[in-house]
């Protein structure tokens, strides 16, 4: 990409300097060993900086062309797809997800006695997008994770079958009360299908 002055594409250089400050602070405070950040707008490169080291135990400075092992990059892409639909007014952040997935109308959770009980609140789109909805992945050792494992979610032949399986599973906690990495993004993908009228791969294309 051709590098240009940020102002030529409507971005403030002063604001971009804040990215540098935050990056330096994260490295100094030990939150991350190193950061490489690239920002482009309208096909033009406006920011490209590297700060810190290549690893926690490395003294070698991180370089702009270093390679990284990264996981779950479908998640930010799915979030962008959802926010495109949000910008078009297809949903509101406080909408209950059951507006688009009525199959999930009767989700329950366990109380401290191990009894299945109703949730006090409905899961919202915002909670779904921020992993605070109460879903999980089935990787833990508790009773909820065990049920997720038994459901064989990843063997579903369609998004409809996937959602039907989820509808029979309990939540890990009351929606909105905690953060937990989960299948929330997969569920968001099904909502994208229903809002757009396209299957997920078509919409991403």
Image (tube, rainbow, N blue to C red):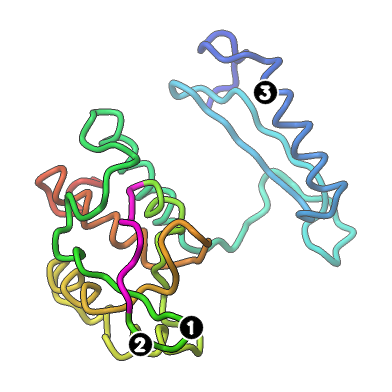
Residue beneath the point at 79% across and 31% down: 21
The residue lying toward the viewer, choosing from 174 and 63, is 174
The residue lying toward the viewer, choosing from 128 and 68, is 128
Q: Which of marks 3 and 2 is in front?
A: 2
Mark 3 to mark 2: distance in Å?
44 Å
Tell me the SS state at disc 2. Answer: helix
Q: Position of residue 121 (x, y in %)?
A: 34, 57
Establish if 152 lies above or below 60. Answer: below
Q: Nearer the viewer, mark 3 or mark 1?
A: 1
Residue that label 3 marks: 16
Residue 137: image quadrant is bottom left
Answer with mark 3 or mark 1, whichever residue precedes in sequence: 3
Residue that label 1 marks: 112
Mark 3 to mark 1: distance in Å?
48 Å
Quadrant including the C terminus:
top left
Question: Residues in magenta?
Answer: 117-125
Main secondary structure of the magenta stretch: loop
Tell me the SS state at disc 1. Answer: loop
Answer with mark 2 or mark 1, whichever residue precedes in sequence: 1
Label 3 neighbourhood size at 10 Å, few (<14), some (14-19), many (20+)? some
Q: Which mark is residue 149?
A: 2
Establish if 14 lies above or below 25. Answer: above
Q: Is 45 placed left or right of 138 in the picture? A: right
Residue beneath the point at 16% across and 44% down: 195
Q: Position of residue 56 (x, y in %)?
A: 81, 64
Mark 2 to mark 1: distance in Å?
21 Å
Taking the magenta stretch, the answer to whether it contains residue 47 is no
Residue beneath the point at 46% across and 58% down: 132
């Amino acid at each position: 990409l051709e590098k240009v002055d940020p102002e030529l594409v409507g971005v403030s250089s002063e604001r971009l300097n804040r990215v540098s400050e935050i990056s330096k602070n994260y490295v100094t405070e030990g939150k991350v060993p190193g950061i490489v950040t690239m920002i482009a707008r309208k096909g033009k490169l406006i920011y490209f900086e590297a700060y810190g080291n290549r690893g926690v135990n490395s003294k070698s400075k991180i370089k702009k062309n270093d390679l990284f092992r990264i996981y779950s990059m479908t998640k930010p892409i799915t979030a962008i797809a959802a926010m495109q639909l949000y910008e078009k007014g297809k949903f509101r952040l406080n909408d209950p997800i059951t507006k688009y997935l009525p199959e999930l109308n009767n989700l329950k959770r366990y109380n401290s006695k191990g009894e299945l009980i109703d949730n006090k609140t409905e899961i919202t789109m915002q909670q779904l997008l921020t992993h605070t909805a109460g879903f999980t992945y089935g990787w833990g050792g508790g009773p909820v994770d065990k049920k997720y494992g038994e459901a064989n979610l990843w063997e579903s032949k369609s998004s409809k079958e996937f959602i039907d399986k989820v509808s029979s599973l309990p939540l890990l906690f009351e929606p909105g009360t905690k953060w937990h990495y989960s299948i929330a993004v997969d569920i968001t993908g099904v909502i994208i299908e229903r809002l757009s009228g396209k299957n997920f791969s078509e919409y991403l294309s």
